[in-house]
Image (tube, helix red, strand yellow):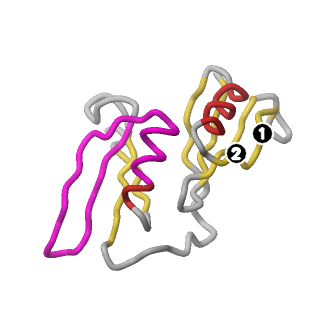
Amino acid sequence: MRLLHTMIRVGDLDRSIAFYTEVLGMRLLRRTDYPSGRFTNVFVGYEDESKAAVLELTHNWDTQSYDHGNAFGHVAVEVADAAKACDEVRKRGGKVVREAGPMKHGTTVIAFVEDPDGYKIEFVQR
């Protein structure tokens, strides 16, 4: 077994694709429209789906925003330098919500950024 993908629902698909590809540097892997179901699935990631887990962005055509609830936490991305990754996100118009530094009660350096729908992406420094 292996982890394939994590799905999140997004309100503005083009804005989300731009964030994940232009701000976080992922590649658009595939896009499929389902007119009879009135939704689109887009898969983005750093590697092909055959090699690594990816994100599935689901856009329901008639829904502009979602309540995230209190169960989902974040998506984590490994980075070489969390502070530098935050600087790059800011340069590309992204939002940093927690600057790079040691995690609470630990020594691992982490940071958090936020996507256009309010989902948190954690940068974990190697």
Label 2 crowd bin: few (<14), some (14–19), many (20+), radius 10 Å = some
Q: Pick whichever, 119 or 90, lies toward us.
A: 90
Residue 107 location, quadrant = top right
Q: Which residue is mark 1?
A: 99
What is the number of the mark on residue 43? none
Q: How many numbered discs sit on the rendered protein?
A: 2
Compared with 58, 38 (above or below) is below
Q: Is residue 27 magenta?
A: yes
Amino acid type, label 2: Val
Location of residue 36 in the rendering, given as x and y in whole percent from the top left corner? 13, 75
Looking at the picture, does residue 64 appear above or below residue 50? Answer: below
* Residue sitting at x 26%, y 69%: 39
Q: Is residue 104 left or right of residue 125?
A: right
Are the residues flagged by discs 1 and 2 in contact, CB closer than 8 Å? Answer: yes
Q: Secondary structure at mark 2?
A: strand
Residue 85 lies, with reference to residue 120, above or below; the image says above
What residue is at 43 percent from the left and 68 percent from the top? 11
Coordinates of residue 97 in the picture (x, y in percent): 73, 49
Q: Residue furthest bottom?
A: 62
Residue 1 on the magenta span: no
On the rendered structure, is 46 left or right of 70? left
- Name the quarter where the C terminus is drawn: top right
Residue at 36 percent across and 42 percent down: it is 44
How dense is the environment of label 1, judged by Cα within 10 Å: few (below 14), some, or many (20 and up)? Answer: some
Q: CA distance from mark 1 to mark 2?
A: 7 Å
Residue under numbered circle 2:
96
The local secondary structure at tag 1 comes to strand
Residue 66 lies left or right of residue 47; in this view the side is: right
Residue 27, how many percent across, how many down? Answer: 35, 35
Q: Amino acid at mark 1?
A: Glu
Point out the stretch of residues depicted in magenta.
Answer: 16-45
